[in-house]
Image (cartoon, rainbow, N blue to C red):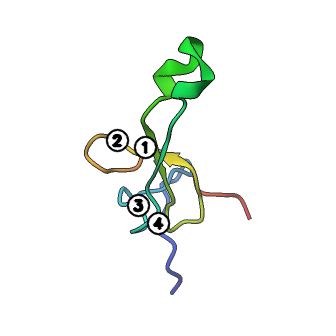
Amino acid sequence: MSDKPTATPDGYCTNKEPVPGTIRTINASATGPKFFRLHGRRYAACPCGRTSIGVTDRNNLHRHKQPQE
């Protein structure tokens, strides 16, 4: 059995927990006021193989599709 989480019939990953140690914060405050809303965004990786998935305030991954193989 593989370590990949299961997927729904429409291709979305059912995993909500990010891989430990992969959460990182993107700081875009130096890019100017137009992109200020990007400041403080957090991204993480999923065990399904996707990287740079947004993380919610409750440290859950946003809904995402598994990578195509």
Pointer 1 or 2: first along the chain: 2
Residue positioned 57% across, 19% down in the render: 35
Rendered location of residue 60, percent (x, y): 33, 50
Q: Are marks 1 and 3 in contact (CB under 8 Å)?
A: no
Front tag of 1 and 3: 3
Identify the residue position indicated by label 4 in the image. 6
Q: Which sits in the foreground, 46 or 10? A: 46
CA gap, disc 3 and disc 2: 11 Å
Mark 1 vs mark 2: in front = 2
Mark 3 residue type: Pro
Marks 4 and 2: in contact by CB < 8 Å? Answer: no
Task: Give yes or no for contact between labels 4 and 1 (Cβ–Cβ under 8 Å).
Answer: no
Residue 18: give its label: 3
Q: Which callout, 4 or 3, points at the residue further toward the start of the chain? A: 4
Please tell me whether mark 4 sits on a helix, a strand or a loop: loop
Amino acid at the residue labelled 2:
Thr
Q: Which residue is mark 2?
A: 56
Dot label at residue 5: none
Disc 2 to disc 4, C-alpha distance = 21 Å
**Decide: marks 1, 2 in contact (CB < 8 A)?**
yes
Q: Check the image and report above or below for 50 versus 29.
A: below
